[in-house]
Structures are given as structure tokens and as C-alpha cells.
Image (cartoon, rainbow, N blue to C red):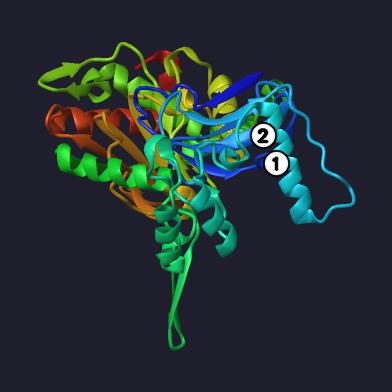
Amino acid sequence: MIIEILVPQLPESVSEASLLQWKKKVGDAVARDEQLIDIETDKVVLEIAAPQAGVLVSIVQAEGAIVGSLQLIATIDTEATVAAPANTSTAAGEKIRVEAVAKEAGVSASAIGFGTAVMPAAKKLAADSGVNPAEVGGTGRGGRVLKEDVQNHLAKPAAAAAPASAPVATQQGDRTEQRVPMSRLRARVAERLLESQQTNAILTTFNEINMKPLMDLRNKYKEKFEKDHGVKLGFMGFFVKAAVHALKKFPIVNASVDGNDIVYHGYFDIGVAVGSPRGLVVPVIRNADQLSLAEIEKTIADFGKRAQAGKLSMDELTGGTYTISNGGTFGSMMSTPIINPPQSAILGMHATKERVVVENGEMVIRPMMYLAQSYDHRIIDGREAVLSLVAIKEVIEDPARLLLDI
């Protein structure tokens, strides 16, 4: 029985994805739930596994191919078996194995290797030239690989024939450069940030926070907190709580623009920027207003671990009504964060540094942090932008306000 391997149904916000590295070759046996390939979207990397055990009889889309929802990328024969004679050479054994798989799968041997037919003349030229038909894009009917396709492939410069994800190195004397294609995540981030700057009327308001009250509170309770809840007490949880507090007071900051309409959100989905090996991702804490501080800290810790492992789901990276980014973890003192569309505001945290400030007419040293809130001036006036940031400042400098809701 032939089983089709399809691209999963992608969310509406994700129009396409790209195939990374195939873990199996045509003719390989695969076990149920064994990983076949990773698919990279602009948000996450998805693992595509075999739904049933069998033999991989065709790969329809190459590594680096751009694919859409439910598109066919490979087929598995659940009744085929793999058997290569032990006394044959590697090349001969591979040929016999592929022919055996093709016979059991009921397809032509020339079709094995890319899931599309390779015409006889093209097959001969590819064999004579040492070209894998899987690397040749077919332009014939139904994607058939023609002799001309192989000739065009051979005529390409080496760099052009390289896989889409492969870096290309160039050298002029003792000066070297390396050209590396953007990942889909990086390309999409670049596209969205440029879109944000072009479509939003972005302004940024700044303030500074005395972190001493919060630091004292954390130092007093961090051991007890971790013992009772099994998670460390950080600062981000307090800032999420403070942001929700401010957004409740000024709902326009939690709103978004849709055409000529302003959409006021009756919920608080807070995105928290997290670093990952693939770049910056922003998982979303859903209904943050309904979560305890411990639940928020557990969610953030879980996001951080799974971001490093590339295990965040699309749903977790989609949506959000407000974002918090902490450049201070990298030492940033001041920045102007860019809004994450279609949101209308973003909070930027920065490094905490001891500075001399004036309190009650006297100079004292306090651990201070600069805060920046960028906002879309199309719908948020300076008053709401400034006062919402002040509301965050007041809560962080006096955490008891959260209990009293003032």
C-alpha cells in the first residue's frame, strides 16, 4: 500500500515552508514514527515522521524546496521490503535494491529517486555524467526530467548548483567572504520588521525604574519560591504582570489596527522574546492576566528550554497582543524596539546598572533600568503611551500595587 507523505496543514499566517535535510534516502526502510525530514517555516521547524512502517519509494520534493500546506513530498510503500545481495559492490547493490523496491511498489525504476519520471535520454546522460537525478529539476510534463534539464544542470556554475542552504565561499587574494542564504525564519523576521517600520507610525517613549524594591523582594523570597513552585523567581514574570496591569488601565495599548478599524482585545496574550539557535522567536503567554506569577515563570522557563531545542509549536508563536523584549540580558543600555505587527506596542527592557540618582534631595546609588515602549501613533496618543509606561514603572518600584490593583 502506497502512503503519501504530505506537508502538514499550515496556519493561515504561514503561507509556505521549506524542506531541510532528508533523513532517509529512496529505498531505505523506515519505522513507524521515524523522522523523515524537517520542514522550516518562518516560525518553527516541524518534524515530519513516517505514519507507518515501510520503504521510502519516492521523494517528490528536494531539500530546499518551497512547499505549501498538504503538498505531496514523498511516498512510502508499507508492503515493500529492502533486500540487497551481500556479495555485490555498493553501487551495484544500491541499483539492485532500488529496482527491487520499484518492482514491489509498482513504479518504474527510473522514477525512483525523485518521485517524478526520468526520461531514458536524461537518465543515460545523468549516469554518464555522475549526476543524481534528484538534483535536477524536471521541466517536462508532470515534472519529468528531460535530457535538456540534465544538460542545463551540468552547465550551471558550481555555486548555483549547490543546495539552497549551502554557504558559498569566495576569495580575492587573502580576503575571503562567505555568502550564506537566510533561513526562512531570518528572512521572515526581516520582512516583518521592514513591514512594521513602513506601515506603523512608530514612536518610542522612555522612562527609568529603580529596581531595588523588586530586587529586595526577589532576594527575600527566591529560595522559598523555588522550593514551593519548582521554578526560579525571575524578573520577567513581574514585568509580564506589570504589563497586564498597565494594559488594563489603557486598553488602546493592547489594541490593533485592522484596515480602518481599531480592534480592542478583551484578553492579554503577552509575547516574550526568546533567543534560539535559529534566531529570535516570540512565544506567547496566553491569558496572562489569569495566571499566577509562578505559572508565568514556569511558562517562560518552558519556552526557553523548548526554543533551544526547536520544539516550540506554531500555535505558541502565533498571535499576541503585546510583546516584551529584554535586550538587557545581552548588556543593552538603551534601544528602540520595533513593533511586532499587528500589535501596536512593545516594551523593551534593558540592563540594570548602579547609577547615582536623587531621592529626597540627596544623591544615592540605586540599581536603575531604562525602559522603552515603542507604540503605533496612528491609534495610541502620547498620553496613553507615556502613562501606560509610568504604570509599569510604578508597579515594579512598588510591587504591592499588584496585590491592591492600584
Measuring from the top left, give residue 280's x and y in whole percent.
45, 44
Which residue lies most toward the front here? Answer: 120
**Where does the C terminus fall, quadrant-wise?**
top left
- Residue drawn at the location 78% of the way across and 49% of the way down: 93
- Residue drawn at the location 22% of the way across and 23% of the way down: 256
Q: Compare residues 80 and 188 and report the one nearer the observer.
A: 80
Left or right placement of residue 66 versus residue 89 in this view: left
Residue 102, disc: 2
Residue type (three-letter) at the residue carrying disc 2: Ala
Residue type (three-letter) at the residue carrying disc 1: Val
* Dot 2: element: helix
Q: Residues within 10 Å of mark 1 (few under 14, many from 20)?
A: many
Decide if residue 196 is in sight here: yes
Left or right placement of residue 396 versus residue 377 in this view: right
Residue 88, disc: none
| Placement of 246 over or under 236, stated as above or below | above
From the image, tell me which residue sits under label 1. 98
Q: In which quarter of the view is residue 5 placed?
A: top right
- Residue drawn at the location 44% of the way across and 26% of the way down: 284
Q: Compare residues 162 and 331 and report the one nearer the observer.
A: 162
- Residue drawn at the location 61% of the way across and 31% of the way down: 107
Q: Compare residues 181 and 106 and report the one nearer the observer.
A: 106
Measuring from the top left, give residue 174's x and y in whole percent.
46, 87
**Where does the N terminus fall, quadrant-wise?**
top right
Residues at marks 2 and 1, CA–CA distance in whole angstroms:
6 Å
Decide if residue 180 is in sight here: no
| Placement of 102 over or under 156, stated as above or below | above
* Dot 1: element: helix
Which residue lies most toward the right here? Answer: 87
Q: In which quarter of the view is residue 211 placed?
A: top left
Q: Residues within 10 Å of mark 2 (few under 14, many from 20)?
A: many
| Placement of 116 over or under 133, stated as above or below | above
